Image (cartoon, helix red, strand yellow):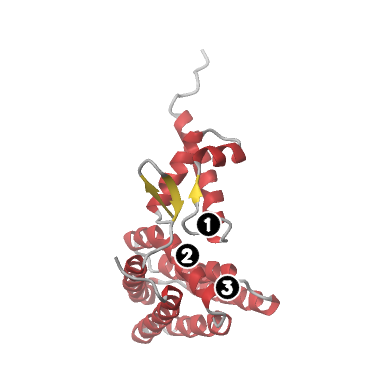
């Protein structure tokens, strides 16, 4: 007798649909189609994507965990703009995680890990020649650092960094939009870091990584001029 399809497959399908909704909304936030403080209405999203409100609600919960949206009771869900306190927390945590990643990378990375970093830098160079956008620069910057963290061979470090990734992406995009000098710095700063990693020079790589993240943070703060803590 033929067995029926197990019931547990149904929620798995819902999770896949929620993934798709989350991907679409995340992209709209990161490329600016959804602006900071703009409200995201479940019904409108569901109608536009031709899905029920359940996957939209699940997707918004996921984006809230990533720090891309926030919810106000009885008012709805809104696109987040990280506060100064948020920026400082993301920056300091990212810096600490990636310094640990550098320490582990110089010990554990394979030639293939080095080659992947080289490939990202080559892609950045090609994009700059044809004209790189702030979003493309932020995406490739994230790709380089994710490759670094993956090459560290530290699973819990990777999981923690991935939870922070989309907030870091927002900070990088804001920094790039505010100051076009990212085009002049993008290749050189990553190339220097790669050279130190290739040489297994942990001390130099850590110094360059700290300088790299500190520079991005300092430029990002310009976008918060006039903002107040609280």
- Asked whether the beta carbons under mark 3 and mark 2 sit within 8 Å of each other, the answer is no
Q: Nearer the viewer, residue 81 or 175?
A: 81
Quadrant that contains the C terminus:
bottom left
For label 3, the residue is: 119
Q: Given the current orientation, which residue lies at the most extreme left position?
A: 230
Residue 124 is situated, as x and y percent measured from the top left of the image, at 60, 75
Per the model, the C-alpha gap separating discs 3 and 2 is: 23 Å
Earlier residue among tags 2 and 1? 1
Of the numbered discs 3 and 2, the one sitting upstream in the chain is 3
Local SS, label 1: helix
Q: Please report contact status of discs 2 and 1: CB closer than 8 Å, yes or no.
A: yes
Residue where numbered disc 2 is placed: 170
Seen from the viewer's position, the closer of residues 195 and 17 is 17
Of the residues tagged 3 and 2, which is closer to the observer?
2
**Residue drawn at (34%, 65%) of the image:** 86
Give the image location of residue 38, x and y in percent: 50, 53
């Amino acid at each position: 007798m033929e067995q029926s399809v197990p019931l547990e497959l149904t929620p798995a399908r819902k999770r896949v649909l929620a993934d798709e909704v989350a991907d679409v909304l995340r992209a709209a936030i990161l490329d600016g189609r959804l602006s900071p403080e703009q409200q995201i209405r479940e019904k409108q999203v569901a109608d536009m994507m031709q899905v029920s409100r359940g996957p939209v609600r699940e997707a918004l919960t996921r984006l809230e965990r990533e720090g891309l949206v926030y919810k106000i009771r009885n008012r709805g869900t809104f696109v987040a703009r990280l506060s100064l306190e948020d920026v400082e927390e993301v920056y300091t945590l990212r810096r600490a995680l990636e310094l640990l990643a550098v320490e582990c990378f110089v010990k554990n990375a394979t030639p293939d890990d080095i080659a992947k970093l080289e490939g990202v830098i080559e892609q950045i160079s090609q994009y700059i020649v044809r004209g790189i956008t702030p979003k493309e620069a932020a995406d490739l910057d994230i790709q380089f650092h994710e490759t670094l963290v993956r090459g560290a061979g530290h699973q819990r470090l990777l999981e923690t960094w991935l939870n922070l990734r989309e907030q870091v992406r927002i900070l990088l995009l804001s920094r790039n939009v505010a100051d076009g000098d990212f085009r002049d710095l993008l290749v050189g700063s990553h190339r220097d870091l790669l050279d130190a990693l290739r040489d297994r020079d942990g001390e130099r790589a850590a110094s360059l990584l700290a300088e790299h993240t500190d520079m991005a943070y300092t430029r990002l703060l310009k976008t918060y001029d006039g903002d107040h803590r609280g």
